[in-house]
Amino acid sequence: MFTNKGRPSDSMPATPEPMSQPRRTPGRAGIASIIANGVKITGTIDADGAEIQVDGEVEGNVRGGSLTVGDTGMVKGDVISESVTVHGRVEGSVRARKVMLARNAHVLGDIVHQSLSVEMGAVFEGQCRYLQDPLSQPGQGAPSAPTSPPERPSMFGGGSVFGDSDDRMASGVVVTGSSN
């Protein structure tokens, strides 16, 4: 079918150079593992730094890099993650560097955080505690309870009502109202 038509066959077509870098499979970056609405999982989820979105129900502890609980999502267990965004419901303690409670959120449990934001309309029933590095403390997500109630500062000295600057507590926070 193809012929040289009298041309010498000295010139061979160029072959592609071997790949200098190994072929990479797409990583988990940017792709969330989704637990869909209507799906119920019973047991521990350990996502090893990956992103998780819960629109269904998880009955057990959740550990991951980033957790989003959707409007229809519910987690009944402790959560440990780099960042947690709650639109739905969490019944258990939350330990994360960054915690965001959206206006539809309902959290029943303690929160240990480095950064906490609560939108108008969110409900949070529990204690929140600021730590410089909330993921470095041992434990399975449950914040350690204070051993004794904090002392009230005297008029003539003493420290902050919240103790030292790395350890602040607030109790029974409920934010309600409407946003414009």
Image (cartoon, rainbow, N blue to C red):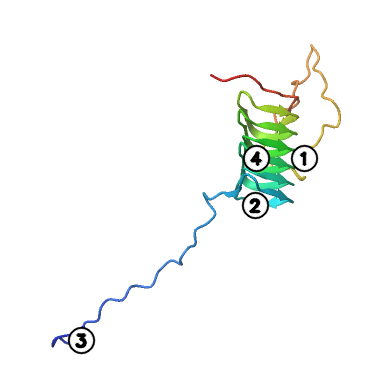
Q: Considering depth in this image, is 97 or 57 the residue closer to the camera? A: 57
Closest to the camera, between mark 1 and mark 4, is 4
Q: Would you say the residues marked 1 and 4 are in contact, meaning their CB atoms lie under 8 Å apart?
A: no
Amino acid residing under circle 2: Ala
Q: Which residue is mark 4?
A: 73
Q: Which mark is residue 142?
A: 1
The answer to which quarter of the image holds residue 76 is: top right
SS under mark 4: loop
Task: Establish if 78 lies above or below 149.
Answer: below
SS under mark 3: loop
User: Which of disc 4 and disc 1 is earlier in sequence?
Assistant: 4
Residue 27, position as x, y percentages in the image: 52, 57
Q: Would you say the residues marked 3 and 2 are in contact, meaning their CB atoms lie under 8 Å apart?
A: no
Q: Which residue is mark 3?
A: 9
- What is the distance, in whole Å, between disc 1 and disc 4 at their CAs? 21 Å
User: Which of disc 3 and disc 4 is earlier in sequence?
Assistant: 3
Q: Which residue is mark 2?
A: 47
3 sits to left or right of 107: left
Q: Residue at x 62, y 30 (%)?
A: 104
Bin the neighbour count of mark 1 within 10 Å (Cα to Cα): few under 14, some 14-19, many 20 and up: some
Amino acid residing under circle 4: Gly
Task: Establish if 61 lies above or below 115.
Answer: below
Task: Establish if 19 lies above or below 160.
Answer: below
Q: Would you say the residues marked 4 and 3 are in contact, meaning their CB atoms lie under 8 Å apart?
A: no
